Image (cartoon, rainbow, N blue to C red):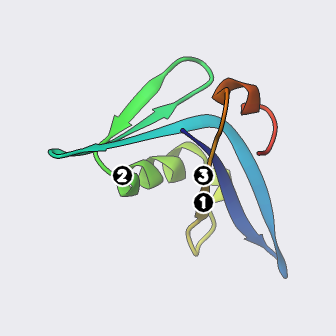
Amino acid sequence: MFMVEMVRPYQNSSVSRFLPDLIVQGQWDEGEAVLWCKPSGVVWTFDTLDESAQALQQEYPALVDEQGMVWHRHELGGDPFAHRHQPP
C-alpha cells in the first residue's frame, strides 16, 4: 500500500503535496491491478500504474503544469490509515 506525493515545479523550486488517497498495487501471473482508494470510500481500479497516473492528472489538475506532473509512491508500513493525514 502506498501514499501518493505529487510534485509541481514552482519558480526555481518545487511544491510537494501528499494526497489523502492510497494506492494498492497487486501483481499475479495474468497481469497487474492498481486500486486507487479515496478517503470517501470510492475505489477506482486500473490495469497499470500509467493508467492511474493519467487519472491523477485529471483528478488534480491544479498540481499539473504545461510540463506535466511528477508523482512518487511512498510505501506504507503498519496501519496505512494512520498515515492518511500526515507525510510518511
Residue named by callout 3: 61
In percent of width and height, residue 83 lies at 74, 33
Point out the residue furthest to the bottom here: 12
Q: Position of residue 16 (x, y in %)?
A: 77, 58
Q: Which residue is mark 2?
A: 51
Q: Kindly check if marks 3 and 1 are in contact, taking CB atoms under 8 A apart as contact.
A: no
Q: Residue furthest front?
A: 78
- Residue where numbered disc 1 is placed: 71
Residue 88 lies, with reference to residue 69, above or below; the image says above
Q: In the image, is residue 6 above or below residue 20?
A: below
**Residue drawn at (73%, 46%) of the image:** 18
Residue type at numbered disc 3: Pro
C-alpha separation, residue under disc 1 versus residue under disc 2: 13 Å
7 versus 45 height, above or below: below
Q: Secondary structure at mark 1?
A: strand
Nearer to the camera, 78 or 42: 78
Residue at image point 65% right, 30% down: 80
**Secondary structure found at label 2:** helix
- Tag 2: amino acid: Glu
Q: Position of residue 33 (x, y in %)?
A: 31, 41
- Residue 58 drawn above or below residue 79: below
Mark 3 → mark 1, Cα distance in angstroms:
13 Å
* Residue plotted at (15% across, 45% down): 30
Circle 2 crowding by C-alpha within 10 Å: few under 14, some 14–19, many from 20: few
Residue 21: quadrant of the picture: top right
Q: Residue furthest top?
A: 41
Q: Is residue 58 left or right of residue 60?
A: left
